């Protein structure tokens, strides 16, 4: 009767879920709250995102918030189209964990 919680366990599959980290003004202000922003594939679930971040960076994730962004239009010459759509995930880490060394090595 309950929902089954199936999470991909292959580390290669989990690594493919994370597209890139987001470095914007809003994302850098979220760093003070120990929150990190990533673009992920649109079909990734919160549990899969949590497992991917924990396996890639060896940290503990306490919360994952996701949002589907609207597609952006792209024009090349006379042809109209759309950019690839991504889901954005805001990942909250446990107090004491950090990704600053992994994401920003020069700091």
Image (spheres, rainbow, N blue to C red):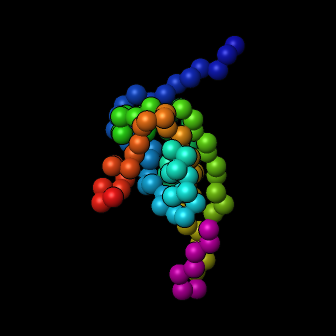
Rendering quarter of residue 69 = bottom right
Q: Residue at x 57, y 35 (%)?
A: 63
Which residue occupies the foreground of this view, 72 or 20?
Answer: 20
- Vertically, is 79 above or below 52? below
Span colored in magenta: 72-78
- Position of residue 70 measured from the top left corner of the image (x, y, whole percent): 66, 60
Percent coordinates x, y for residue 46 in the rendering: 56, 36
Whether residue 40 can be seen here: no
Q: Position of residue 21 (x, y in %)?
A: 45, 54
Rendered view: 51 above or below 43 = above
Q: Quadrant of the N terminus?
A: top right
Q: How many labels sit on residues? A: 0
61 above or below 36?
A: above
Q: Residue 42 location in percent, x, y?
A: 56, 48
Residue in the image at 67% along x and 16% along y: 2
**Is 79 positioned to the left or the right of 18 in the image?**
right
Q: Quadrant of the C terminus?
A: bottom left
């Amino acid at each position: 009767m309950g929902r089954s919680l199936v999470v991909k366990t292959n580390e290669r599959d989990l690594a493919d879920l994370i597209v890139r980290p987001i470095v914007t003004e809003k994302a850098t202000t979220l760093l003070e709250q120990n929150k990190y922003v990533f673009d992920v594939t649109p079909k990734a679930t919160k549990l899969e995102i949590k497992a991917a971040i924990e396996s890639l960076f060896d940290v503990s994730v306490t919360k994952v918030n996701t949002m589907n962004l609207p597609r952006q239009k792209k024009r090349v010459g006379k042809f109209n189209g759309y950019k690839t759509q991504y889901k954005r995930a805001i990942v909250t880490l446990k107090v004491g964990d950090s990704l600053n060394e992994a994401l920003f090595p020069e700091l």
